[in-house]
Amino acid sequence: NKVLYSAMQSTGTLTLGNYMGALDNWVKLADEYQTFYAIADLHSLTVRQDPADIRKRARDLYILYVAAGLDPEKNCIYYQSHVGAHAELSWILNCFTYMGELNRMTQFKDKAAKHSDNINAGLYTYPVLMAADILLYQADVVPVGADQKQHLEITRDIANRFNSIYGDVFTVPEPYIGKATAKIMSLQDPTKKMSKSDENPNASILLMDDPDTIMRKFKRAVTDSDAQIIYKEDKPGIMNLINIYSSITGKTVEEVEKEFDGKGYGDFKMAVGESVVNKLKPLQDRFYDLQKNKDYINSCIKENDEKAAYFANKTLRKAQKKVGLLERI
Ligand code: TYM
C-alpha cells in the first residue's frame, strides 16, 4: 500500500482553513493509503509557548483528528515528540541541507519578521524537521494547504540529494493540495490566508466556534460593493465564500453562481454560514464526547506511538548506516 503522511502543529486552535485545507482531505484520502498523522508538537516549540497550554492543545488536537473522522485503530495518529527518530534523522538531514536553501523559505522570513525577538535556530531548521517527519515513513503523498508547498519542495530536494549519494534510501514524496481549499482566506481581509494567529477574531472561523459565532463571523465577512455572486479574481471575498460553500456542499462553482443568481450578499453569507455550521456540528459533538473518554484515547496514543516508532526506526537505522555511523553492537 502507498503511504500517506501529514501533520499539524499544536499551536493555537484550528481554523476552518486547517480543516478544509488539510484535515478534511486527510479523512477523504484515509481509506486509500497506509496513513500516519502526527501532532507536530516539536515544531510548536519554535515559538514561545505556555507549557500547560500547549500540553492541553496537543491532547485536544489528537481528539480533534479522531472527531473529524480518522479512526485511530486504522490510522496511525501519534505524537512527533514521542518518536525519538524525528529529532535524530533531523540532525542527519541538517548536514545535507544548505543555509542558502533555508534562507529562501518564505515562511521563515514571515515568522522571523513577526517574532523578531526570538529568531531561534529551530525556526530556521523547521523545514528540515518536517522533511525528517515525512521521509521517516517513506511517504508517497502528503496532503497539505498551499502554504506548505515550499516545505514539500525542500523535502524532495533533500531526499533526492541524499538518495543520489547513498542510493535509494528515501521515497520522494508528492504534495497533495486540494484545488478550491488550498488556501482559505481571512474573512476580514480576503487577500490574506486565514490563520490561527490572526489578531482580529472575526477573521477566522475556529473549529470549535458555536453556531451563533460562526453565523456572526460570516455575516461580517468582508466582500465588495458590486452585489454579484460570481467567481472572479477581483472579487476575492466572494471567491473565498464560493470556495468554502462549494467544497462543503459538493456543488460546482457554476451551480453555486446559478443558485444565488439575483440574490443578495446577505442571503449568500447566511447559506455559507449554515453549511459550515452543519459540517462542524457533528465534529464538535464527537469531540466533546471523546474528550470524556480518556482511557480509550490513551490506549490509542500508546499503541500508535509504538507503531510509528517501529516504522520510523527502520528508516532511521538505514540512514545512519548509509552515512557511516557505527552500527549498534
Ligand atoms: P500548520 O499546523 O500551520 O497547518 C496545518 C495544515 O493546515 C493547512 N492550512 C491551510 N490550508 C488552507 N487554507 C488555510 N488558510 C490554511 N491554514 C493552514 C496547512 O497548509 C497545513 O497543511 N509545518 C506544518 C506541520 C507539519 C507537517 C509535517 C505537515 C509538520 N511536519 C509533515 C506535513 C508533513 C504546519 O505548520 O502546518
Image (tube, rainbow, N blue to C red):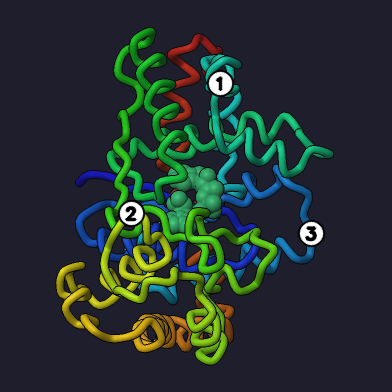
Extreme-right residue of the structure: 117
Nearer to the camera, 238 or 43: 238
Crowding at label 3, few (<14), some or many (≥20) Cα neighbours within 10 Å? few
Is 310 placed left or right of 140 in the picture? right
Mark number, residue 233? 2
Residue 307 in view in this figure: no
Q: Position of residue 294 (x, y in %)?
A: 58, 79
Which residue in the structure is indicated by mark 1? 92
Crowdedness near tag 1: few (<14), some (14–19) or many (≥20) residues, C-alpha within 10 Å: some
Q: Is mark 3 within 8 Å of ligand 1?
A: no
Whether the residues at callouts 1 and 3 have beta carbons within 8 Å, the answer is no
Amino acid carrying label 2: it is: Glu
* Residue 265: percent from left, percent from top: 38, 81
- The kind of residue tagged 3 is Pro
Find out whether the residues at labels 2 and 1 contact each other: C-beta distance under 8 Å.
no
- Quick one: label 2 or label 3, which is nearer the N terminus? 3
Query: Residues under labels 2 and 3: Cα distance?
Result: 43 Å
Residue at x 37% of width, y 47% of height: 5
- Give neighbour class at mark 2: few <14, some 14-19, many 20+ (Cα, 10 Å): few
Tell me the quadrant of the picture where the C terminus can be found: top right
Residue 135 can be seen, yes or no: yes
Residues at marks 2 and 3 touching, judged by CB atoms closer than 8 Å: no
Residue under pointer 3: 51
Three-letter code, disc 1? Ile
Where disc 3 sits, the SS reads helix
Q: What kind of element bears circle 1?
A: helix
Taking 75 as reference, is 90 above or below it? Answer: above
